[in-house]
Image: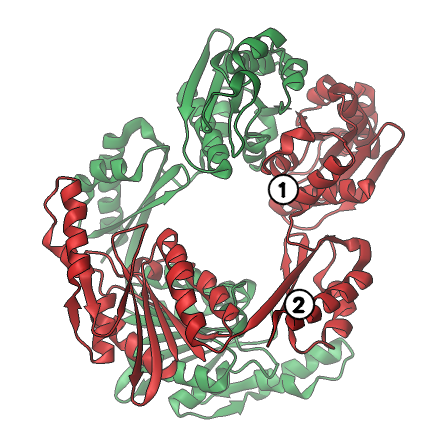
Chain colours: A green, B red
Amino acid sequence: MIAEIIAAGSEMLTPFRQDTNSLFLTAELNDLGVQVAFKTIVGDNLDHLTAAAAIAIGRADIVLFSGGLGPTQDDLTREAAAAALHLELHPDPAILTALYKRFAARQIAMPPNNAKQADLIDGATLLENKNGSAPGQYLDTVVNGLRKIVILLPGPPKELKPLFAEQVKPRLAATLPPRFLAKRQLRMALIPESQVDARTAPIYTQYPDVETTILAHSGEIQLHFLCAKPTLAQAQARVDQLTERIEAEMDDAIFSSHGESLEDIVLLNLGLRNLTLAAAESCTGGLLSQRLTAIPGSSRYFLGGAVVYSDALKTAFANVPPETIATHGPVSEETARALAQGIRLRTGASLGIAITGIAGPTPGTGPDADKPIGLVYIALADANHTHVKQLHLQGDRERIRHWSSQHALELIRQHIL
Amino acid sequence: MIAEIIAAGSEMLTPFRQDTNSLFLTAELNDLGVQVAFKTIVGDNLDHLTAAAAIAIGRADIVLFSGGLGPTQDDLTREAAAAALHLELHPDPAILTALYKRFAARQIAMPPNNAKQADLIDGATLLENKNGSAPGQYLDTVVNGLRKIVILLPGPPKELKPLFAEQVKPRLAATLPPRFLAKRQLRMALIPESQVDARTAPIYTQYPDVETTILAHSGEIQLHFLCAKPTLAQAQARVDQLTERIEAEMDDAIFSSHGESLEDIVLLNLGLRNLTLAAAESCTGGLLSQRLTAIPGSSRYFLGGAVVYSDALKTAFANVPPETIATHGPVSEETARALAQGIRLRTGASLGIAITGIAGPTPGTGPDADKPIGLVYIALADANHTHVKQLHLQGDRERIRHWSSQHALELIRQHIL
């Protein structure tokens, strides 16, 4: 069974807007064992939309439309789908009544255009939309001797997602061959994708029945595993076996095996060991603190810290001796060490983390004038030791800052382990 | 002239990856007066890709392919486009030689698959790819009596963008009717989209020859204006006239009329008035500082500050009297005021900004226990006054934090004006 997704809406043919519903729909369809073979994006033009619908009905078993179900003249999906199927539209009396009631409750006369939202393709089932006025439609039919399932969904993601989950997925699951899926995810920080692939490919290629996807984000690699079997136990056993072998190979590099973010894991580990953390940030300017405090409940383990962008603040908030900065420069092992120790002392945290570096695009000044853009020092201080890591990062300001915060989080995680 | 963009690649039919090249290509084509009428995303399957190519060549004047030009078996765009056009592929000797030389320089024998990158559709012009090994192709031909322009582009954005800009756009511009475009952009913070539309629609609807697009981002509204005329002066005059009238209507609400971000504008205004800024952040946890320091050169006007997530740090880094916190709570007008004044004094900045609030999802504790999630205080202190703003923000933690930082930036901007 292959599917095509048609996103209807002229705004998605501008440089400003993109179809995102299809990512959600693809994940849901894959769960049901259905591959998406085509995606088409088409504007609010009846001829274009009808032609696209006819092509999709010709080449796919399941056709999903998103958008174009509202009350305006630009909402043409019902008409286009019906025309492509050579079927007619007739108003559904119950929906029509519900629409009139909806407006009556607001003491407004219903504009005549709205009535078209009750138009149903002959033979289709209406899908109630709890989060908007335009209902969806589900049609299981035969075209030229072939079974075709045609599904009309509203465009706004907040309407489409619950409507699909509650009313479309169960219908499709009941009609498609049963399928039991197991999924796992492993996440690693700061390792090149090529290295992860070189070390894990010899393992995952032995599991051709498990679909392995490697995704590289900025400073993070995710391995996604997906397996379908006649029973859930069989699927789960295969995925777990593969995951275990990859965990053994990649070992400490894996920070999460159940989807948690690096920030989640750092905070979780601080909590488990009853530790608190404070940060002194220079080149990252609050990015590390912002990432940690984005997690609900972080206040129990992350106390806060200082954004010591200026040299004076490095002294005022983190006790860095001015002569350390004058001699070695703000971007130096010595300054990083003093920052981590200083912020720890000043805040009373168990651990102090510090980041100082040259994020560019302008070079450093004074004692830092000859240092390269991308030079970053990360320091982590506890009561006994201070560990400093020197980095040479590539890329633009945004990338250098993000990778610096990523290295800081990973340094904390490794230290606690 | 209408265009279709075909993105080739099975990875874009997964839940993980999306075509983004088409946003860039759409903007570039619109510049040339070409509307994009269809976008198709298709996998690495010769039948599917050939069928999609044939449909596109049938319904569009210009067909752009992105991706599928590499050396692997999955790279099928050349074959599919040639088949759909009923044309043949022949290797280009110069490109073939260049490919052999490229591998020889690395002292590797060229794998035979790579030779297919030199295959050229009969009649097409090769487009040199300075950033990768797969060249593009440009074909201006006639199919069934209609002129068709078919363009093959490499998939990686870093290859596609310069190749399009340097080699495709000039070719299209030379062959399409001349068109002179003027563009402007106005940006506003913290105003509801409906209000902007209600106030500006009576003006912009008087300019049907100017295309107006309203985009709502989180806490920001952008108005984009685009006008095409026989001369640049005519186009510019219309856009400037409309922009001026909207500026007069929206007045101070507009923070930027040449595309600058709110952070840019705040830093620019600090610089113009020779002011410095420091921040004390509680619920935003570094987000405001991070946004400001993301701008190159921000260190001249933004000194840094403190992430005062814990109550103790509010006292230690920003001189908030413990009894203020005990009496009024960390989330209170009094604490916000003390934070702004304290961080200003402790850092020696001209202006101190403070943010304290309940970002949720867990409610406040102690004196804050009865305060609602979304209650946020922003305070701005200069040498003479401290202004405090109380907000009731809606939404989840991420939204409340982002809007808080947005309100803080807007408060600074309005204060400096």
Q: Quadrant of residue A414?
A: top left
* Distance of label 2 from label 1 (alpha carbons): 49 Å
Closer-to-camera residue (B288/B185): B185
Q: Are marks 2 and 1 in contact (CB under 8 Å)?
A: no
Q: Earlier in the sequence, mark 2 or mark 1?
A: 2
What residue is pinned by disc 2?
B236
Residue B362 locus on image (x, y percent): 64, 38
Q: How many marks?
A: 2
Which residue is rendered at x = 27% and y = 61% of the image?
B68
Closer-to-camera residue (A84/B267): B267
Residue B322 locus on image (x, y percent): 79, 19
Q: Is residue B90 left or right of residue B58?
A: left
Q: Is residue A156 left or right of residue A101?
A: left
What residue is pinned by disc 1?
B361
**Disc 1 sits on a residue from what chain?**
B
Question: Type of residue at label 1?
Answer: Pro
Closer-to-camera residue (A290/A281): A281
